[in-house]
Amino acid sequence: TDQVCLLKSPRDECFAPLKNAEGDDSVTTVQEALQALDRKIYKKVFSHSPPSSAFELGQELHFLSENGAELSQESHKLKYVYKEG
């Protein structure tokens, strides 16, 4: 087709390369980047600070938070899952 679409997003919200076993761009830095994004989304969605332990948000929260939807844990039965860190 002749149509072009451009998607512009902050780098820290959409890019965490995994290239090395240790150091920069390693599994550890990718995990830290994903956790930082989940903490940011959690605070935006639930309007309070995220838990201090490691956790993982469900993918539905990532998409809903991008759209600026008004969300509440009770009305949408949204949840987050703790994982031992």
Image (spheres, rainbow, N blue to C red):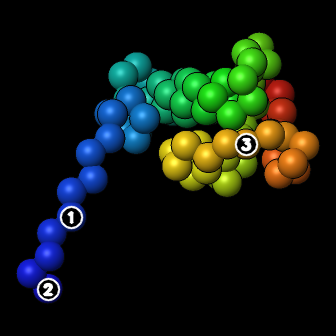
Q: Residue at x 36, y 22 (%)?
A: 24
The residue that disc 2 covers is: 1
Nearest the camera: 35 or 63? 63
Which of the two discs, 3 and 2, sits closer to the camera? 3
| Lower sequence index among marks 1 and 3 | 1
Numbered label tally: 3
* Residue 36 in the image, given as x and y percentages of width and height: 56, 24
Q: Secondary structure at mark 1?
A: loop
Which residue is disc 3 drawn over? 71
Instruction: Name the residue rendered at 14%, 76% in the picture.
Output: 3
Residue 5 circle label = 1
- Mark 2: which amino acid? Thr
Q: Is residue 57 above or below residue 40?
A: below
Front residue of this view, candidates 35 and 73: 73
Report the side of 53 relative to 42 (left or right): right
Which part of the image, by quadrant, shows the C terminus? top right
